[in-house]
Image (spheres, rainbow, N blue to C red):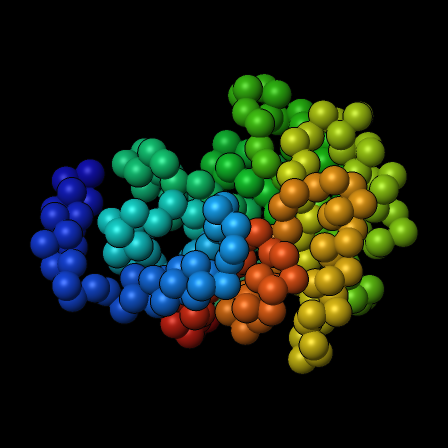
Amino acid sequence: MFFLIIVGKIESINSFNMHQNVNNLVLIQDLIKDKSKKDELPTIIAVSKKFKISEILPLLNYGHEDFGENQVQEALEKWIDIKNNFKNIKLHMIGKLQTNKVKSAVKLFDYIHSVDNLKLAEKIANEQVKINKNIKIFIQINIGKEDQKSGIDIENLNSFYTKCKSEFNLNVVGLMCLPPLNLNSDNYFIRMKKLANNLNLKELSMGMSNDFETALDCGSTYIRVGSKIFGKRTS
Ligand SMILES: *Cc1c(COP(=O)(O)O)cnc(C)c1O
């Protein structure tokens, strides 16, 4: 606690000389403002997986609120204390979620972007009722129909969405995808936008460091940016 306060002070005195990660974030924020015609700007999720708190702290002190992690254990170790000190933080689970990790995930996270099967949906529902939480849910779509990727197939989306809503009472806010690598992402993003429109879902979680500009042009409302903010992940 004490440590955090001190670092916060130094950071704000030094605001002329912003930390590189903050600079990177501000560049993306400016780009979004230029692109967007709407009042409500898309959210930048700073994907901090594999990065230490010391790399994250400058962004926290700058006031950034949305962060993404892809492993429950790593997220618990890094974020429990931080969340107690920075009350406005919204933590996004963006990776594959095993049902045996749901209980701790539901306690820690505010959004889950990777709901891709009924067992998981049901478990999230059961756990969040116990602690009176209402997590914002994205359904992950296997938009490129790739064997190695998780996600609901397009033809099963309607029935899956209906079950999430009516059987499990989940707060489904949108759809998420990881399009195939090395291909033009825009075709997939455009398809995602249509799927969301058909279900009257407002949010789209799509776009990463290499393709977030394309994703924004296609209507993304949550971009998930790691390396463009934090630099290269080493492990
Ligand atoms: C790691 C990760 C990201 C961020 O990737 P970058 O290329 O570093 O921006 C986004 N989404 C998911 C699901 C990820 O696992």
Q: Is residue 73 visible?
A: no
Image quadrant in which the C terminus is located? bottom left
The residue under the point 35% across, 49% down is 64
Q: Is residue 51 above or below residue 102?
A: below
Q: Is residue 169 above or below residue 154?
A: above
Q: Is residue 167 visible?
A: yes
Left or right, 93 with respect to 138, comes to left
Q: Residue furthest bottom?
A: 182
**Residue 89 at x, y = what percent?**
39, 40
Kindly indicate the quadrant of the structure image that contains residue 161: top right
**Residue 201 at x, y = what percent?**
70, 41
The residue under the point 82% across, 32% down is 163
The residue under the point 57% across, 33% down is 135
**Residue 145 at x, y = what percent?**
82, 64
Left or right, 2 with respect to 201, comes to left
The residue lying toward the viewer, choosing from 96 and 166, is 166
Image quadrant in which the N terminus is located? top left
**Quadrant position of ligand 1:** bottom right
Left or right, 83 with respect to 210, comes to left
Kindly indicate the quadrant of the structure image that contains residue 210: bottom right
